[in-house]
Image: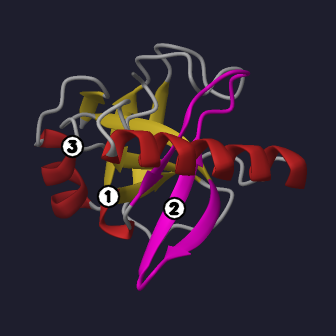
Amino acid sequence: MFENLNDGSNEALAALARHGSVVVQVASGSMLPTVEVGAQVMVRAAPPRLGEVALLRVRTGGFILHRLVARIGLGRRMRWVHAGDAPGAGAGLCAPEEVLGTAELERRLPTRRRRLALVLSALGRAALARLGGASADPRV
């Protein structure tokens, strides 16, 4: 199965459910230099772990391939903080059910300082989105 990450179709979800894996084509540079634009990446339906690259379903209906850089609790809800590896790539928050699978890529974490900056950025973006001032989607 081959999916472009930006098409927003449910075929990737169906392939993950049927086969337990899907090959996706990376459509943006947010994961540079780890993953080149146009690269094909195998994603497996597996529980995510901190530091892994995951396929996420974003609220706008599309998909994004980002690294899981932190887990935070917001009241009784847990959220993943995710970000691209590219310098300047945005950070965002996602619910556990929005993590569709993990990519067969190296598991690693940014430095503690970088992780803290990403967490603060994701929380700030989420707060602004709630106030109607920004998109919670880090691609926007």
Q: Secondary structure at mark 1?
A: helix
- Expressed as whole percent of the image width and height from the top left, the position of residue 16 reads 25, 56
Q: Label for residue 98? A: 1
Q: How is the image coloured?
A: secondary structure
Name the quarter where the C terminus is drawn.
Answer: top left
Pointer 1 and pointer 3: residues touching (CB < 8 Å)? no
Residue at label 3? 12
Q: Is residue 40 placed above or below 82 in the rendered structure?
A: above
Q: Secondary structure at mark 2?
A: strand
Magenta residues span: 69-94
In the figure, is residue 48 to the left or right of 52?
A: left
Residue at label 2? 80
Out of 9 and 116, give the one closest to the viewer: 116
Q: Earlier in the sequence, mark 1 or mark 3?
A: 3
Could you tell me how far apart the alpha carbons at marks 3 and 2 are, in whole angstroms? 21 Å
Out of 50 and 24, give the one closest to the viewer: 50
Q: Residues within 10 Å of mark 1 (few under 14, many from 20)?
A: some
**Secondary structure predominantly adopted by residues drawn in magenta:** strand
Type of residue at label 2?
A: Trp
Type of residue at label 3?
A: Ala
Pointer 1 and pointer 2: residues touching (CB < 8 Å)? yes
The residue positioned 55% from the left and 51% from the top of the image is 123
- Expressed as whole percent of the image width and height from the top left, the position of residue 61 reads 18, 37
Q: Residues within 10 Å of mark 2 (few under 14, many from 20)?
A: many
